[in-house]
Image (cartoon, rainbow, N blue to C red):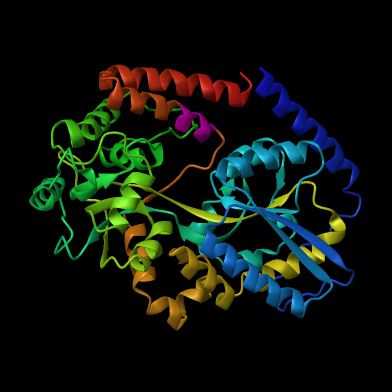
């Protein structure tokens, strides 16, 4: 009830102030030539960017501020959870930034809490039309667009070391066979062991690929959890059998363990996201990228795709409207959008960027576009937070406490239903 009360307070307070500041709403603009802000303006941006992307942003921002000296952009970095909680807390206190950059799964929570505003309050439809339609849809809910996405993907794919695996396995049976051929584990000498297949077994964002592969769906059309079913039982059993039945991987695999092994050339196959691909090439891995294999009795592992992008604070000072438009026109032109896409190893969201040579001739960009075809968009509604929170403990209970998958599916559903009720204030 405390969470409910906080959300209601935020909504009511911001609704009140929104009414107080709407006497002369700025006309949406931008979509053609770059408009110029007249008065000196400071734009505060809070972001959750990978290190390489931060460097690119700073370079582009320096060029931007040189061209528009009356606009100063101040970037503050946070990790994923910190960004979410700090933005909520600061906005509640009237101390939030003008722009917040991060994954699209923040949209639902920020939208329901009244902390962000539709981007169409500031930007013209003609500007949004320069962005890929699927990417735009990832930030669309409650009849409004809430983000300006700059990269599209964030998808997990199957990565393999070509020095260890000649070609990508197309089925789970092929993967098991190939992995066991190269696997050489010495329990007494793990540093000199070789692993056939590794992945982050604890994280629901990975697990959902197995659930979707068995035909599952996290929510129904009304955003209610749908987790207690045959697909969930099969997916939980599948993940448990990776180690228990096939003897692949290591108990307790989180993000860092598989990532480190693959970078060191000690793992042949890994499931990991597009954000990691550049780091493996930098580590000298001869990297192959393919969709997840077909699961026994199911379909291809079907991971989520999602965008990252900019959201506009509901508290943004209307006097900064022209500066915000100038910012987006500059940062979202094709050339700059391509820079961010390459830095993130993910597809650019701006359509015109797809035809630039640096995108068309880049192997990772081509792989990103190909593997996106085997993904499904991640729901961005606030209720999805309850699904993620319900999924993790039950997944770990199956993996480490020998809980029966059927019991875990039932309890997962109950946890999710209770979480959704809290979010909805029921």
Say whether residue 384 is magenta. Answer: yes
Left/right of residue 405 with respect to residue 225 in the rendered view: left
Above or below: residue 238 compared with residue 261: above
At x 45%, y 65%, the residue is 347
Left/right of residue 338 with respect to residue 18 in the rendered view: left
Point out the image quarter for the N terminus: top right
Left/right of residue 53 with respect to residue 302 in the rendered view: right
At x 64%, y 73%, the residue is 60
At x 78%, y 75%, the residue is 35
Say whether residue 59 is magenta. Answer: no
Q: Position of residue 393 (x, y in %)?
A: 40, 25
Q: Position of residue 290 (x, y in %)?
A: 26, 59
Point out the image quarter for the C terminus: top right
Q: Position of residue 38 (x, y in %)?
A: 88, 72
Main SS of the magenta part reads helix
Left/right of residue 223 with respect to residue 278 in the rendered view: right
Q: Outermost residue, front direction? A: 188
Q: Nearer the viewer, residue 211 or 404?
A: 404
Span colored in magenta: 383-389
Q: Is residue 130 visible?
A: no
Total tally of numbered discs in the picture? 0
Q: Quadrant of residue 217?
A: top left
Q: Is residue 351 visible?
A: yes
Q: Nearer the viewer, residue 129 or 114?
A: 114
Q: Nearer the viewer, residue 43 or 426?
A: 43
Q: Position of residue 111 (x, y in %)?
A: 65, 41
At x 38%, y 46%, the residue is 256
């Amino acid at each position: 009830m405390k969470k409910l009360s906080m959300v209601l307070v935020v909504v009511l307070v911001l609704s009140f102030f929104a009414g107080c500041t709407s006497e002369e709403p700025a006309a949406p603009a931008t979509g053609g030539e770059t408009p110029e802000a007249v008065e000196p303006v400071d734009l505060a941006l809070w972001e959750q960017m990978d290190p390489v992307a931060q460097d690119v942003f700073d370079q582009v921002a320096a060029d931007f501020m040189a061209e528009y000296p009356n606009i100063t952009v101040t970037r503050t970095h946070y990790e994923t959870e910190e960004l979410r909680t700090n933005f909520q807390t600061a906005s509640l206190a009237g101390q939030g930034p003008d722009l917040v950059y991060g994954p699209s799964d923040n949209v639902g929570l920020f939208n329901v809490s009244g902390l962000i505003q539709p981007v169409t309050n500031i930007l013209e439809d003609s500007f949004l039309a320069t962005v890929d339609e699927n990417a735009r849809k990832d930030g669309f809910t409650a009849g409004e667009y809430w983000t300006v996405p700059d990269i599209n993907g964030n998808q997990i794919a199957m990565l393999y070391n070509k020095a260890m695996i000649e070609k990508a396995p197309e089925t789970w049976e092929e993967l098991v066979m190939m992995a066991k051929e190269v696997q050489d584990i010495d329990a007494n000498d793990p540093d000199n062991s070789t692993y056939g297949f590794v992945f982050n077994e604890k994280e629901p964002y990975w697990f959902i690929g197995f659930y979707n592969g068995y035909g599952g769906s996290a929510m129904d059309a009304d955003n209610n959890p749908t987790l207690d079913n045959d697909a969930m039982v099969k997916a939980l059993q599948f993940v448990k059998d990776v180690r228990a039945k096939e003897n692949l991987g290591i108990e307790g695999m989180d993000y860092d363990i598989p990532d480190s092994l693959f970078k060191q050339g000690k793992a042949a196959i890994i499931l990991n996201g597009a954000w990691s691909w550049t780091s493996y090439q930098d580590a000298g891995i001869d990297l192959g990228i393919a969709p997840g294999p077909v699961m026994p009795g199911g379909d291809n592992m079907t991971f989520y795709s999602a965008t990252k992008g900019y959201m506009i604070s509901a508290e943004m000072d209307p006097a900064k409207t022209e500066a915000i438009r100038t910012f987006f026109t500059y940062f979202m032109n094709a050339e700059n959008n391509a820079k961010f896409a390459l830095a993130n190893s993910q597809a650019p969201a701006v359509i015109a960027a797809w035809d630039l040579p640096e995108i068309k001739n880049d192997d990772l960009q081509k792989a990103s576009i190909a593997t996106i075809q085997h993904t499904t968009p991640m729901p961005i509604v606030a209720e999805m937070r309850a699904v993620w929170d319900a999924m993790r403990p039950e997944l770990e209970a199956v993996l480490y406490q020998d809980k029966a998958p059927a019991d875990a599916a039932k309890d997962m559903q109950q946890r999710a239903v209770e979480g959704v009720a809290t979010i909805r204030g029921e």
